[in-house]
Image (spheres, rainbow, N blue to C red):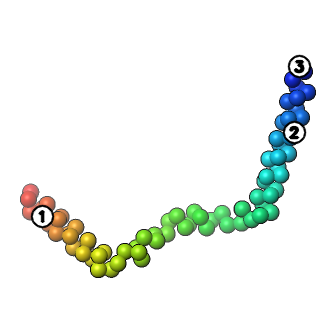
């Protein structure tokens, strides 16, 4: 029963720290843009980095490999 004299103030202290952290996060703008990261992960940023001639040559190579595979059957 005496442990409650320690646990109750300790719990209140931890709760105060959690509330302070939440208030700091809200004031610093952590919750301003909730949709941006969700949409950003769907954007395909890889295509502009691939040179066009390499992209077409890979497509042609895949197409010829597919035709070779079909011809082997």
Mark 2 closeness class: few <14, some 14–19, many ≥20 residues within 10 Å: few
- Is the residue 57 above or below the residue 31 in the image? below
- Res 6 quadrant in image: top right
Instruction: Please report contact status of discs 2 and 3: CB closer than 8 Å, yes or no.
Output: no
Instruction: Please name the residue that numbered disc 1 is placed on.
Output: 68
Judging depth in this view, the residue of 12 and 39 nearest the camera is 12
Q: Answer with the quarter of the image where residue 66 lies.
A: bottom left
Return the disc, 2 or 1, that comes first in the chain's sequence: 2
Q: Residues within 10 Å of mark 1 (few under 14, many from 20)?
A: few
Q: Residue furthest top?
A: 1
Q: Residues within 10 Å of mark 3 (few under 14, many from 20)?
A: few
Q: Nearer the viewer, residue 66 or 27?
A: 27
- As measured in the structure, the alpha-carbon distance from the residue carrying label 3 to the one carrying label 1 is 80 Å
Q: Nearer the viewer, mark 3 or mark 1?
A: 3
When the figure is inspected, residue 66 is found, relative to residue 8, above or below; the finding is below
Dot 2 falls on a residue whose secondary structure is: helix
For the point 37% across and 74% down, the residue is 50
Whether 52 is drawn above or below 8: the answer is below
Circles 3 and 1: CB atoms closer than 8 Å? no
Question: In x, y percent, where is residue 20?
Answer: 83, 52
Quadrant the N terminus occupies: top right
**Residue holding disc 3:** 1
User: Which residue is label 2 attached to?
Assistant: 12
Residue 7, horizontal then vertical, whole percent: 85, 30
Name the residue at 67% across, 66% down: 33
Q: For the residue labelled by badge 3, is the local secondary structure a helix, a strand or a loop? A: loop
């Amino acid at each position: 029963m005496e442990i409650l004299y320690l646990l109750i103030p300790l719990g209140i202290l931890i709760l105060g720290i959690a509330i302070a952290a939440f208030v700091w996060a809200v004031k610093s703008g952590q919750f301003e843009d909730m949709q941006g990261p969700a949409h950003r992960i769907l954007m395909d940023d890889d295509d502009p980095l691939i040179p066009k001639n390499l992209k077409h040559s890979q497509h042609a190579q895949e197409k010829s490999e597919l035709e070779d595979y079909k011809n082997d059957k």
